[in-house]
Image (cartoon, coloured by chain):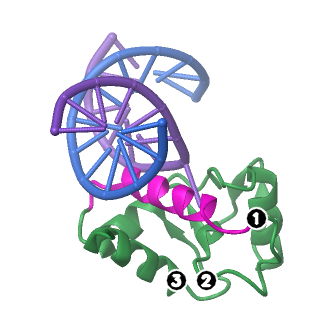
Chain colours: A green, B purple, C blue
DNA sequence: GGTCTGACAGCGT
DNA sequence: CACGCTGCCAGAC
């Protein structure tokens, strides 16, 4: 049973255009619960666990979780590893310094 | 069905 | 300025 919040989260994250980033908090806000940023991470994490791993993000990425970062600019975590996340973000055209996104 | 955990954020010390 | 504690929501065990 998928809750509306979960659906919203996936939808919002899925709508993040390439090259753009969004914080967990922003996603939570757009999903309807500003304080549920914690649940957002949980949802994305579990969501990824259920699918095939190590897939090329360009081919497969129904929900681009890698475009969701922390509110303080730090990349944050990733189901496939922080390193992988940074790599992908770099491919999206972002500059990462010490696990942080350069604004 | 109750309890614990987590890819976080904010405030206090 | 750096570290630690608490709050909050949805999922997994």
* Percent of width and height locating residue C11: 40, 55
Residue annotated with mark 2: A62
Pointer 2 or 3: first along the chain? 3
Instruction: Please tell me whether mark 2 or mark 1 is closer to you in this view.
Output: 1
- Secondary structure of the residue carrying tag 2 is loop
User: What is the quadrant of residue A37 in the picture?
Assistant: bottom left
Of labels 1 and 3, the one closer to you:
1
Q: Which residues are magenta?
A: A34-52
Q: Earlier in the sequence, mark 2 or mark 1?
A: 1
> Which image quarter is the N terminus of chain A in?
bottom left
> In the rendered image, which residue does mark 3 sit on?
A14
Q: Chain of mark 1?
A: A
Q: Is residue C5 above or below residue A65?
A: above
Q: Residues within 10 Å of mark 1 (few under 14, many from 20)?
A: few
Residue at label 1?
A53
Q: Badge 3 local density, few (<14 within 10 Å), some, or many (20+)?
A: some
Residue at left 27%, top 74%? A4
Q: Is residue A64 left or right of residue A96?
A: left
Q: Quadrant of residue A54?
A: bottom right
Q: In which chain is the residue bearing label 2?
A: A
Which sits earlier in the primary sequence, circle 1 or circle 3?
Answer: 3
Other residues around mark 2 within 10 Å, as few (<14) / some (14–19) / many (≥20): few
Q: Residue at x 65, y 55 (%)?
A: A75
> In the figure, residue A57 lies in which quadrant?
bottom right
Q: Is residue A39 left or right of residue A18?
A: left
Q: Residue at x 76, y 64 (%)?
A: A53
Subunit of mark 3? A
Please provide percent x and percent y for residue A38. Answer: 39, 50
Observer-side mark, 2 or 3, equals 2
The magenta stretch spans residue A44: yes
**Is residue A31 found inside the magenta-colored segment of the image?**
no
Label the magenta part by its dominant secondary structure: helix
């Amino acid at each position: 049973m998928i809750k509306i919040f979960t659906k919203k989260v996936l939808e919002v994250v899925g709508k993040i255009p390439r090259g753009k980033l969004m914080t967990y908090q922003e996603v939570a806000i757009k999903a309807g619960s500003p304080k549920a940023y914690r649940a957002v991470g949980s949802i994305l994490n579990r969501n990824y666990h259920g699918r095939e791993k190590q897939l090329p993000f360009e081919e497969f990425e129904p929900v681009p979780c890698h475009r969701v970062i922390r509110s303080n600019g730090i990349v944050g975590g990733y189901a496939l590893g922080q390193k992988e996340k940074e790599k992908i973000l770099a491919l999206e055209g972002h500059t990462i310094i010490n696990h942080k996104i350069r604004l």
